[in-house]
Amino acid sequence: MGRMKFSYGKRAISREIKKIKRLHGSVHRYAAQVSMLIDSEITGKGRFRIKTNSFFTRLYPVGFIVEFAKKIIKSTEEIFNTMIFMEISADDPLTEGKEVLDCHISAMIGLTGDFAGMLSIHCPGTVGMAITGEMLGMDVEEVDEDVKDTLGEIANMVAGGIKQAFAAENVRLGLSIPTTVSGKSYTVSSPTKSNRVIIPFDLEQGRFFVEMKYNLN
Amino acid sequence: MDHAQNIINSTQEIFSSMIMLDVTPGEPFSREREILQDSISGIIGLAGTTKGLLAIHLPKPVALAVTTAFLGMDVEEIDEDVCDAIGELANMLGGSLKSTLDPKGSDIKLSMPSAIHGEEYSVDCLANTENVTVPFALEGETFLVELQISQN
């Protein structure tokens, strides 16, 4: 058990870090409230290494997930503040839970390089339409091509921000092309052995989620 | 580069060597944004000198048959094992295609695979990508292998 200071925006959060079993990426279910969890392996080792191409090994502190969460939040907030001009606020990260997330559009983009991952943005149709309307400056009444393209583009930009944040620490990443999944009923799963962190963001029209699944080798 | 032929080679190789099932390729086409019914899709991203996405879309009965053959155990519903197997299938196809697109092995890297399943959903890519989809017949059913390559 340790205490980790975790701050973003104007808020500073200090919370207990719990030891848990290795996180499993299973079906897409989240709890309404989950405290911040740390991969037990990482906690056990104390530090985590990522080998980079530049003969340089970066040591990550105990709360790698916290580091990850910070980067996701920073990048997402930046994109929304500077490109879409919408106010969003991040909530506590989730890792896994029991409630089925009611989402109708997901935009995903693969990350490769020093570690492999996938970034997804999940949102209900209404939130997707609101974001698209704001970004394109027009009324959007249904989940159409514009909404899918916009969310794909946002996923691309958020992943780009995360890539830059890691590049500053000598961890090199590459991005694939974004894809959107939409429909009345679908579930997104990641490999059982992967880790995931999910950040909920609130805006006026509702809530959306930014999820990062990753594999540390 | 003939992506359709690469897809056919990789898919046949993976299915015959890893899953021990024979698949017959059909006529390649360019998939529009259509809705998938009661299916499962495995997707994996490619990044590096070539950016793209590889997806395999299987109707539920085909996915169950493939998983049964792949894992050597009976599966009746789409569960964690099926999702993992289809994700792994996408990973293997991605790896095989990567080696044809990039014989030196250092220019293209694969992201983590992901599986999507549901009763009604669509998987779309952003515009300006080159899309090649090859249908494959497996015991009377059809599944699709789709490759999207960014054109810049």
Image (spheres, coloured by chain):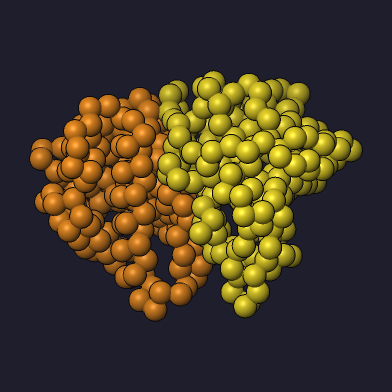
Chain colours: A yellow, B orange
Where does residue A64 sit, x and y in percent of width and height? Answer: 67, 50
Where does residue B23 sit, x and y in percent of width and height? Answer: 14, 50
Residue occupying image coordinates x 10% and y 38%:
B140
For this orientation, the residue located farthest to the right is: A10
Q: Quadrant of residue B46?
A: bottom left
Can see residue A57?
yes
Residue occupying image coordinates x 51% and y 52%:
A215
Residue occupying image coordinates x 19% and y 33%:
B74
Drawn side of residue A181 relative to residue A137, left or right: left
Residue occupying image coordinates x 31% and y 30%:
B78
In the picture, the quarter occupied by the N terminus of chain A is top right
Asked whether A104 or A44 is in front, the reply is A44
Where does residue B3 sit, x and y in percent of width and height? Answer: 31, 63
Drawn side of residue B103 relative to residue A9, left or right: left
User: Is A214 drawn above or below residue A188 in the view shown?
Assistant: below
Drawn side of residue B150 relative to residue A168, left or right: left
User: Is B120 drawn above or below residue B50 in the view shown?
Assistant: above
Drawn side of residue A148 relative to residue B86, left or right: right
Asked whether A212 or A160 is in front, the reply is A212
User: Is A182 drawn above or below residue B45 in the view shown?
Assistant: above
